[in-house]
Amino acid sequence: MEDYAEKLGLMSRIGWHGDVFHFNRFMQFPEERVGRIWGNGKDKSVKKAVNQTAIGQKEVRVSPLAVANMMATIARGGQKKQVRAVSEVQYKNGTTLFAFPQQTLEGEGLSSYTAEQLQKLLQSVVQYGTGERFKALPYTVAGKSGTAETGRKGLVNKWFAAYFPVEQPKYALVVVDLDGKESEAKTNDIVETIIHKLYELDTKK
């Protein structure tokens, strides 16, 4: 699990970082927290703890940014990259002051075969599984829902992570509704709204 979490970019700083003029290790996301799989190394030999960790429970901690980047990594065929909030800074006249180049994340990525299998599984979630309501959207979506227990009675973190359009991926998206009742979660409604709005913007262009 640790190996694949690393290959998916869940265990390292994924926000763009590098040297910018005289700033060493400049970070676009200075408050970013690195994810983790285990809180206690002893859990690796406890069957129940391993089972809970495998489905994202126990001490697993990942950010929405990391999950969105994981979806982008899968959509790209396994190549993991740093996330940029800004591609360049411009002068008032439109010329470039500084450009932030695309940068790959360190470490081994997914094999193309593994990425392809994950793509098929994510597509099947929307075709036949918990994401079936998204079949009618104007973009073909691949994604996965998730419900994380919070330890507080009746409250969960409700997730949906996706990339689209499947035929030629352009967007990765994550929506998470924190500390709410599962029956009242608005996650899926928000996903639908965002995808419709993006489609409208793209067709106008």
Image (tube, rainbow, N blue to C red):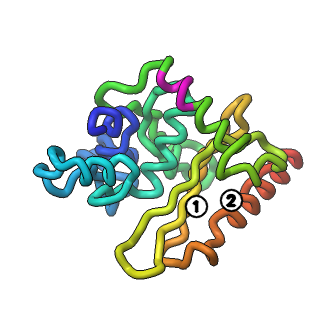
What residue is shown at x 41% (from left), y 25% (from top)? 110
The numbered disc on residue 175 is 1
Specify the amino acid type for callout 1: Val
Furthest residue in direction front, as rendered: 47
Q: Position of residue 92 (x, y in %)?
A: 60, 55
Q: Earlier in the sequence, mark 1 or mark 2?
A: 1
Q: Is residue 13 left or right of residue 113?
A: left
Q: Total of numbered circles in the picture?
A: 2
Up/down of 76 relative to 192, above or below: above
Q: Is residue 179 left or right of residue 34?
A: right
What residue is shown at x 19% (from left), y 57% (from top)? 39
Observer able to see residue 198: yes
What residue would you read off at disc 2? Answer: 191
Judged by its main secondary structure, the magenta piece is helix
Up/down of 76 relative to 160, above or below: above
Specify the amino acid type for callout 2: Val
